[in-house]
Amino acid sequence: TNPGFGSSIDGKLALFGETQRAVYQYIQDNPRCTQAGIGHTLNKSKGQISEVIGKLIEKELILKKDGLLIFTQQGVNPVNYVNSLMRG
């Protein structure tokens, strides 16, 4: 459990800095976005975005499929969720 946090996602995000939270929020607001799009919008370098994306994937907060980034939803099977986004 994560005392003081509403979910395990909140707990994971609490450990991240401002850029990591901004990238996660961008992906949440813009499903199926690209790293290049994030970097352009947030005015961050390709290296910065790549490092953040790696950390978010490692923490299972986002998925990368066919070059597109998708946030995961707690309690949802990530593979089924991604497949449903790709169909619809």
Image: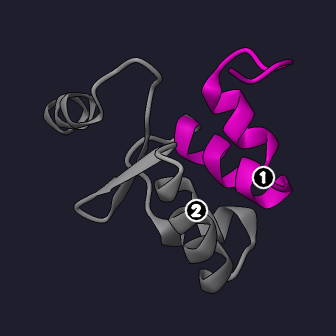
The residue sitting at 25% across, 33% down in the picture is 85
From the top left corner, tell me how far across and down residue 44 is, in percent: 73, 75
The residue sitting at 49% across, 68% down in the picture is 35
Q: Is residue 62 above or below residue 66?
A: above
**9 and 23: which one is in front?**
9
Residue annotated with mark 1: 16
Q: Is residue 21 above or below residue 37?
A: above
Q: Earlier in the sequence, mark 2 or mark 1?
A: 1
Please name the amino acid that badge 1 sits on.
Phe
The residue sitting at 82% across, 19% down in the picture is 3
Q: Do labels 2 and 1 touch, CB within 8 Å?
A: yes
Q: Name the quadrant containing residue 25.
A: top right
Q: Quick one: label 1, few (<14), some, or many (20+) residues within 10 Å?
A: some
Range of magenta residues: 1-28
Q: Quadrant of the C terminus?
A: top left
Give the Cα separation between the discs numbered 2 and 1. 9 Å
From the top left corner, tell me how far across and down residue 75 is, in percent: 40, 17
Which label was assigned to residue 55?
Answer: 2
